[in-house]
Image (cartoon, rainbow, N blue to C red):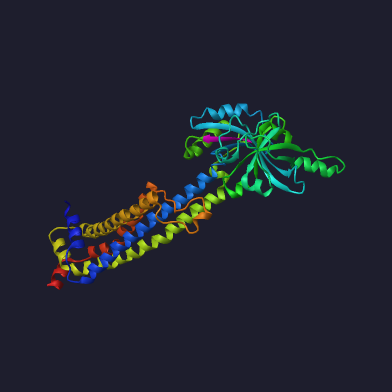
Amino acid sequence: MDYRLLIARRYLVSRRRITLISVVSGISVAGVALGVAALVVVLSVMNGFYDTVRDLLVSYDPHVRIEAADGRGIDQPDSLLALARLNPHVVAAAPFIEGKALLTSRDLADVNRLVVVRGVDPTALDSAVARAVTAGRFDVARRASGAGLVMGRSLAVRMSLVPGPTGENGSRVALLSAPALERTLLNPFGLPAQQVFTLRATYELDPAYDDDHVFIGLPEAQRLFRLTDRVTGIDLRLDDVEAAAAVQRHLRQRLPAERFTVRTWYDLQPSLYSVMQLEKWAASAILTLIIIVAAFNIVGALTMIVMEKRRDLGALQAMGASRRDVARIFLLEGLLVGGLGAGIGLALGLGLALLQQTTGLVKLAEAESFIIDAYPVAIRLFDVAVVTVVAVGLCVLAAVYPARRAATIEPAEAVRSSG
């Protein structure tokens, strides 16, 4: 073993004449351990909330979306669909139409609701909405009874609408698009062009989403919004949500930027994701103060060790050790304090995080109001590595001043004054 590391370890664990040094050293190790454990737990919980929100949003937001840059829609989307499906990460690609319309009930003429209408291709549908059906059957195709419509359960209850038991013979509703409303206002003597639909299913996903989103077939949406053979865009589902950025780059290289925009799930909700990331790193910066306070304790503890071991350090230099070797002893001692504290903190933090992840020990207050009942946890190796490096780095940095002070000791003067 390197003699400098051996001396540093001995200085750390040996008994001292000044008991306060041992107390301060212990407080330093405990402070580093507490800071590391708190950081690991808080970052894991923040990651858990981030993943929960992301998974909820991408259940109805696509992983990647292609839209026309001018906002007028995409003509003949078949070629874009074929191009998108060439990427190995793409598992589903479907065109869609989205716009706002007035939803009215055929039975309750005085109940109207402005909703977001989404036209989908039922043969290419890959959506959590289809898996969240609570009544009826997700069927938006045109049949003998007419075109089908699917809406959120909360919206159906508010408008007193009921889907048919087998997807047929449900409540009848009508949709009036914004262009049709505009034409009606310009021609008040004409009748508004409404399309009638049969409610075939209700779904329950997210209250904010359920309350104003309805689904119809793609051909009916093209007629409703007068888009002929155009679509609003193309939604892509991937085998791995983290591959969205790579797929985005791949498509941007092959599509003219002046005609098409390609956005990932992150680009669709940038403000929300950015705020969550900011909260994560702001909390990390605040908790890092615990480690910084522990590092100040290291400065005091090592400075007192330098004063106590002044004669030993002088004798060591007289035996041939260089000033750099003496300084390195105390830098290594700072490394040992940081490593010991970080190791204890990692064991404690990861243990608590894994316990919460597997058992859900700590419950959310008023959990019945949330989609989860306990604090979510997601451990990231990158975060753990960053916390460890920062903690150990701050401890080594705190040892710089005592190390430089130890290196300035004159051997002859140290031995004479101690003698």
104, 52: nearer the viewer: 104
Pick the quarter of the image with the C terminus: bottom left
> Across the whole image, how many numbered discs are drawn on residues?
0
Left or right of 215, for residue 49: left
Regarding residue 388, the answer to whether it shows in the image is no
Any magenta on residue 205? no
Left or right of 125, for residue 329: left
409, 363: nearer the viewer: 363
Q: Which residues are magenta?
A: 233-237
How far across and down, in percent of the image, does residue 184 sit?
82, 42
Residue 329 figure quarter: bottom left
* Residue located at (39% from left, 60% from top): 288
Regarding residue 101, the answer to whether it shows in the image is yes
266, 249: nearer the viewer: 266
Residue 94 figure quarter: top right
73, 237: nearer the viewer: 237
How far across and down, in percent of the image, does residue 411 sit?
16, 65
Vertical order, 286 against 223 (above or below): below
How far across and down, in percent of the image, does residue 201 sit?
63, 39
Q: Residue furthest right?
A: 189
* Residue located at (85% from left, 42% from top): 187
Q: Main secondary structure of the magenta part?
A: strand
Left or right of 236, for residue 333: left
Left or right of 82, for residue 395: left
How far across and down, in percent of the image, does residue 270 sit?
56, 48
